[in-house]
Image (tube, coloured by chain):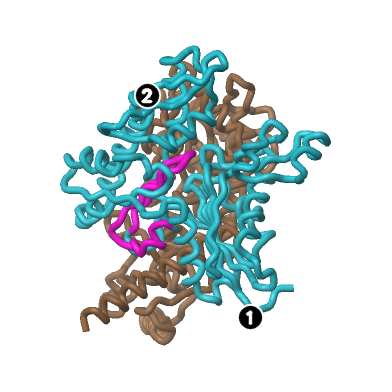
Amino acid sequence: MISVLIERRNLRMKSNILRGVFEDNLRVLGRRAAPRWGTGFTLSRKLLLSLCTAVVMVLIHGSFPSHQWFPESQIRAGLLYRQPVGVPDLRGPAGALSGEVFQALTENQEVPLWRLLGMGVKTIMIDPGHGGRDSGAIGTRGTMEKDLVLDIARRLKSKLEVYDDYRVVLTRDEDVQVPLKERVELAQRHQADIFISIHLNYLPQKPINIIETFYFGPSDDVKTSRLAEKENAGSEIGLNNFKEMVEKLNDELRLVESRELAVSIQSSLYNSSRKHGSDIFDYGTKQAPFVVLLGVDVPSVLVELSCLSNVEEEKKLNTESHRENIARYLETGILDYLGRNKGEALYGASR
Amino acid sequence: MAQADKKLHIGIDLGTSRSSTAADNGEKRWITSYVGWPKDFVAAQVVGKEVLFGDEALENRLSLQICRPLERGIIREGIERSEEAVKAIIRHLVELVSKDSDARIHAVVGVPAESLNINKLAIRKAVSEYVHSLMVVSEPFAVAYGMGQLKNAMVIDIGAGTTDFCIMHGAIPGEDDQRTNLNAGDHIDEQLFSNLSEKYPNATFNINMVRQFKEQYSFVGDIDDEIKVEIPVDGKPVMHDIKDEMRRACESILPALIETTAELIAGFDPEFQAKVKKNIILAGGGSLIRGIDGVLQEALKEYGSCKVTCVDDPLFAGSLGALKLAQDMPASYWETL
């Protein structure tokens, strides 16, 4: 009997691996496998769960569309799924839903509630820094930051678009100057759910190569403040916007989520880059007063992908494969944040 | 026209130094991963072929523009001939084993892990012209699958361009389960070339000769045998003792090998680390270095009890693993791709 069970377990493992290989290859072709409901989650259970959700909604609030359990910004940002550790429960008046049904819904790991309800991050905005007359940093071989970040942003966009679930918008898709204020407005106009600004660092005093990711907040670090001052130049945000800006400072929720997004991106970028480059240093995630991050209402980060001042890195950045890799690492970081780790989402693999 | 009911499964190991192929019709072949095209009209007349492969290409290299497409484990971008060479090798490997041209060919191709990361699409494009359906996987994963080591195992594939590390944990390995470094066979060749140039400045030899010395005599640790090879000096054949130089060159890959192995194990679920340490498998041409399993096992002792073994047939372990994957893959998957 035990040997039969072991045999069955091995067969299941093998079948998962084969499916993983298949899905991985499909993904390279830009296609996706038909959804698979695991053995523990049959279609009938899925329907039952959906029905329970609808019934609970009607009982408590009378109608589905008017419910206000969760503020819209939280729902769009996928907060219902990713509750950060050590942060108070931000899921609205969950007490109103106390009971076994709510527990069953929220504890279902296979289909997170926000996904079950068809909610989640819909629009991802990628912001390639600088552009037009503002070339950003320039390497010793004449490589311009504005060109590299635009190329990486385009690659990232096409990668994320493979997942049909996301609309991916760039703040600029050509070599034009876009003031920071306009970038913020673009995020609002397109109802972006997360905002990722990508830049390259320039440290002429140090021959090193570093990766760091910022989210909005005060900084007492001189280097970070200088960097923010440099990136904030030409924001075109006037003092008439001051009050609105200060009000946003208190948006703790956005801060928590921005930090989570920063951590996901930084760890993916650093860990993967380390495998391919010997002299990369992890400068971690930090708070910094970047205007573009303050202006955007949703989780937002600014990533300094690597250092254009580093001669070796500049050479590598001029190769397509390196830029493609960086885009891939960014993609993994974003998917991790969205609770859709490539490994888990596509392979059903977890240790 | 391919017949829908006739299928041929092929496993291919596309390596930097050697490539092998195996099919479920029982055919098994390998070539050195060199492709050569005649340099000009005269060369074309001399060699009598449009393209030459493997050892034949090496023998005629003075008449050929020669390409080793997966140098350092990846297809060099922008070098058109690298992509063309990958295509030519694949076509050749498929033709070597697919005698029945009517069958639908389902191929699984194992490539160096680094190449899988960087050139996945390029490899697919190169291969897809010659097969009906195709999957690309990393080399160490193919080896592990072929050996049935799907869980709590670590495969270290010491190739020519790269050494690929892969931990198997019952699922397809993700990025965190794999590592790649460039301390592999080509690195040993460069070290040996440099060591010999230093010790015998008057001897004339090239990297190809050095590679042959390595393939015949490589070792780590202590051995009693002498290692003497013939190298010309001023045109006269002279025997040279290369034992110390050979040991130093081969042992130059050990520090990175040990460090990466320990690091990857340390990052694994602590509950299963002991099991993985007891199941470390060396594959690739580097597993043929005499004494490497024992030295690695000894070096890893400080991390606890370890067991390191070598695959029986490093030349075909990858292609047979890829073939097994191809055979086990459900038909519906092949149809979709």
The circle on residue B245 is 2
Q: Residue at x 51, y 65 (%)?
A: A23
Relative horizontal placement of residue B54, taking residue A296 as reference (left or right):
right
In the rendered image, the quadrant that contains the N terminus of chain A is: bottom left
Residue type, mark 1 in image: Asp
Q: Residue at x 40, y 66 (%)?
A: A348
Q: Residue B147 in magenta?
A: yes
Q: Residue at x 62, y 33 (%)?
A: A146
**Helix, strand, or loop for circle 1?**
strand
Residue type, mark 2 in image: Glu
Residue linked to disc 1: B5
Whole-percent x, y for residue A351 in the image:
31, 60
Task: Chain A: give its colour.
Answer: brown
Position of residue A208 relative to residue A258, above or below, is: above
Relative horizontal placement of residue B23, taking residue B145 as reference (left or right):
right
Residue A90 appears anywhere in the view: yes
Measured Cα–Cα span from mark 1 to mark 2 = 56 Å
Task: Magenta stretch: give its range.
Answer: B143-168
Residue A250 appears anywhere in the view: no
The circle on residue B125 is none
Position of residue A71 relative to residue B41, above or below, is: below
